[in-house]
Amino acid sequence: MSHVAVSDARPAAPAPHKGSLSARSLPRWAGAGFAVVSIALAVGIGLVFGLQSKVQWGLIAALLFILVSYAVTTAVENKRQAKDRVATSLVWVCFILAVIPLASLLWTTISRGTKVLNGYFLSHSMAGVPGFETGGGVYHALIGTLEQVGLATLISAPLGLLAAVYLVEYGKGALAKAVTFFVDVMTGIPSIVAGLFILTLMLMFDLGPSGFMGSLALAILMLPVVVRSTEEMLKLVPNELREAALALGVPKWRMILKVVLPTAIGGITTGVMLAIARIAGETAPIMLLVFGNQLINTNPFQGAQSSLPFYIWEQYRVGSDAAYDRAWAAALVLIAFVMILNLVARGIARWKAPKTGR
Amino acid sequence: MKLQRKNRLRATALGVIAVSSALALTACGSDNNSGGGSTGGSGDKTTGAASSVKCDGAKGQLLASGSSAQKNAMDLWVKNYMAACKDAQVNYKSSSSGDGIVAFTQGTVGFAGSDSPLNPQQVEDSKKVCSGGQGINLPMVGGPIAVGFHVEGVDSLVLDASTIAKIFNGKITKWNDEAITKLNPSAKLPDLAIQAFHRSTDSGTTENLTKYLSATAKTDWPYPPAKKWAASGGQAASGSGDVAAQVKQVNGAIGYFELSYAASQSIKTVDINTGASAPVKATAENASKAIAAAKIAGTGKDLALKLDYTTKADGAYPLVLVTYEVACDKGNKPATLGAVKSFLAYTASADGQKLLSDASYAPIPAEINAKVLETVNSLS
Amino acid sequence: MASSIATDTPPPPAPASAQRRKQSTGRAGDKIFLGLSRGSGIFLLVVMAAIAIFLSVRAGIAISKDQGNFLTTFDWDPAGSPPVFGIAVLLFGTVVSSIIAMVIAVPIAVGIALFISHYAPRKLAAPLAYVVDLLAAVPSIVYGVWGALFLVPYLGGLNDWLDQYMGWTYVFEKTEVGVARSMFTVGILLAIMILPIVTSVSREVFLQVPRMNEEAALALGATRWEVIRLSVLPFGRSGVISASMLGLGRALGETMAVATVLSPSYVLSLHVLDPGGGTFAQNIAAKFDESNQLGRDALIASGLVLFVLTLLVNGAARMIIARRKEYSGANA
């Protein structure tokens, strides 16, 4: 496809011939120069017309930047170079546009979260702390999250692993196709739907809310992710390894356990950890299933629990400054938890990169 | 092979570290918040009241949920109760009256908090969970519904029922509307759009507000009183706290919530012109005067109240709500019965009720309260 | 590409390996292992089936009791008498907010992906890609709280500006006063949330463009933009489409971020700047607690519609990806 595209380009390629090697070109600092000029102009326009919003200034500056660089480059170099410059600046603008909100999100969380985040906050629950007052902590929610996520992992990691082994090592025919298809479908289940499903079960069997119910919903969300990533990793294990093992007379199940899985274990671990990171922040199913709690409840099978995302939601809804501070601090804890999982997962991936045999 | 074994060793070590750190973590947390951290607020004033709590061997965890209007009172009660009864834990989830009643009729919670009594259908539903009995309403917390506003440069505002109805119904859209300026000749009202906030979820606060509006300003509020917001337009927020937060944040906003939200967030509240000699401020004291005129409308053990929203008595704030604790008269779950009885007995006791006025709520009138206590002690 | 090896040439069947010595243990072990792994696969199917059946049954009960039209009613009152509820507003809101999110996020995400793969200095590119991947893991409730406390106040100015200068488009006309707790804000927040995932998938695709194609174009004197337009974008088109679909699937099912930011109502309006509207997931989260049995069934019915919707979108994305894989396999 792309070959064709390139050959199409050929007629357009020849540049104007006025001394092709010594064509006039803008100096390297031209981009920066345009930026300075357009920002200055934008500030000028903003002041003259009395525009209040700094966002408008920024937009005008960006627009001017593109116009100025296009005009100047067309004049000095040529249209093609001008287009290239416009594309470059557009890409930069995209990048900056995206960085602003994301940086603001992280900055807000960190700057507001560190206000109340300390050892006390991490080691105390909300027992007996009225929502409007300061004090209290996140410990009960932290325990809840760890236990629920841990249970979900205990359920879905072995199941997902085995299902992936089935797909890669045994899978043929209609069953494997069906499983592959439904794993894809399952990745798309909105988390609230998984929560609804467990809740209907819960009401049917007359069970009370507990951390375990939450982890069942989380396990449903986690399962397809584990299957998918494990499958990819197992496929990367070179076939020569399998054949060598089989040729030595090793039964297939031992071959899988001793050769295939150990080879891919790094990637599998990474996949599982990324899946954990993904479900640790799930709020919607937790909201329906674990009830929420102000107190420490270390037993996930009995009684209401809390969890970090639920805690954030709960504190957000209280609506006072003290509660907002707690919400931000909990958000920071949650983000840190997820990020650490991510980093560790990537570390493992690098440490035990699958030996692709190349 | 050697390399593999080494890796496995490393993995085991990692696992051991993870598990042991998790164990260490479970050991170091604490539910005890009585020491540092919490400062000021109404909590400290009332810790002495805990001495009157009778635990009666209440054990285990009591789940409860419902009205967000009584959340601030509940927070204090729970704090004191748990300080006195180490074996019992009360977990009150503040969401909405509708939520509480559903959770109660499904048997999820030991008692529910609701700003309006059970309707006949809900009583019917409750018979399923109360073996041999039914759900009853125990009036526990009274309070003024404050109409909070946020207009820069305006510190006090007087409105009457019909103006409030017109504002929430979208008929009055500017703060300098003639209807408002007439009631507030001295205030400097800006030419600013009114942003009315209401509750998006089924709410007892909404029901009480609309009961008041339809009792006193029928022509301007044509909708029947309901938990669900009936008027079109305006903006919605999910809980009392959420509405209060919006009013605090947005210039030109008006919203309604239980007074303690206004007090703790320092939101200015509307004085209501009831036709009495002077406009009435939204205070716990003034609300008590209105609630004192309430009559018991429930039969048997049910103590649902009938409130008089049209009162014109001097200093009686008519826009009030009463939050009921809903429990079974008979057939409470044995596991939580002890805790329900001892906790509700505390909240209905003299100490429990005294704590209310400190936290911008209104206590229940003495004679009704006596009946509540009596009923609580007879729960089974 | 390497992944296709394993499926193309499946390892020889197990019986071939069953040699004289460990015959018995091998066979028993094989049977157990096969049973376990096949069982897990089947379990997965059972769970899926259970979800589908459960939701359908519950939804059926609810719809049969609905006195309004489930598809066209503009209200949600299953507790009322008669019970009336319909998904019109929710479906509309879900689609509109997702479309806004896509319109904003996809071009920007492609831009960032190109930036990382082709424009950024090499030293910057790797950490950037890393950061983008990490951002994909920020929990949605954090986006929600940030959106409600930070984004909404900031967007007030933009909303007024759009109303003033773009009001003639009808869509950007603001007919009701209110802070920016509108569908448009929800769309922007969703755009920010799906940006990382769309970016990271697109970037992967752009990096897979055969080096030869780009070098050929460069050798012919093409500018960097021409290289991208002529060789990178055509190669990556289907990848970008499927990345967008994945993002769309996420936007459709997002719950908490919408629930914190939106001022919900059951009014269907194309004025995206007005407060109001609702989405499936937001409605479920907001109403579930306080619903009675019928109300819950009604919400489950709406959840089923959401389920089908995301299923269609994800299915389409997978099909496009699958087709692309065939292409790239042929290229390699």
Image: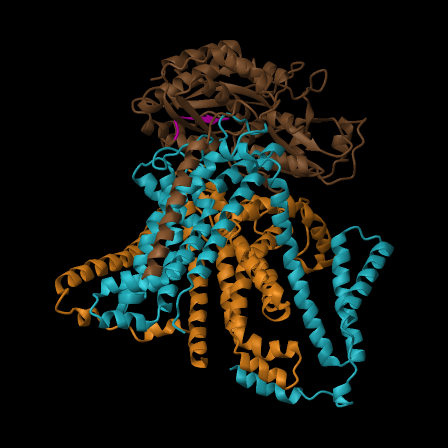
Chain colours: A cyan, B brown, C orange
Could you tell me residue C204's position as x and y percent? 51, 68
Q: Nearer the viewer, residue B14 or C182?
A: B14
Could you tell me residue B110's position as x and y percent? 39, 26
Q: Nearer the viewer, residue B120 or C287?
A: C287
Q: Nearer the viewer, residue A326 or A50?
A: A326
Residue C78 appears in the rendering: no
Picture mark count: 0
Please state the extent of the stretch shown in magenta in the rendering.
B109-115
Q: Is residue B228 magenta?
A: no
The answer to whether A12 is drawn above or below residue B96 in the figure is: below
* Residue that appears at 37% across and 73% down: C4
- Of all residues, the one furthest to the right in this rendering is A48
Q: Nearer the viewer, residue B349 or C5?
A: C5
Q: Is residue B269 left or right of residue A177?
A: right
The answer to whether C159 is drawn above or below residue B34 in the figure is: below
Could you tell me residue C25's position as x and y percent? 15, 60
The quadrant where residue B243 appears: top right
Could you tell me residue C250's position as x and y percent? 49, 56
Q: Is residue A39 left or right of residue A232?
A: right
Residue A6 appears in the rendering: yes
- Of all residues, the one furthest to the front in this rendering is B2
Quadrant location, the N terminus of chain B:
bottom left
Quadrant location, the C terminus of chain B:
top left
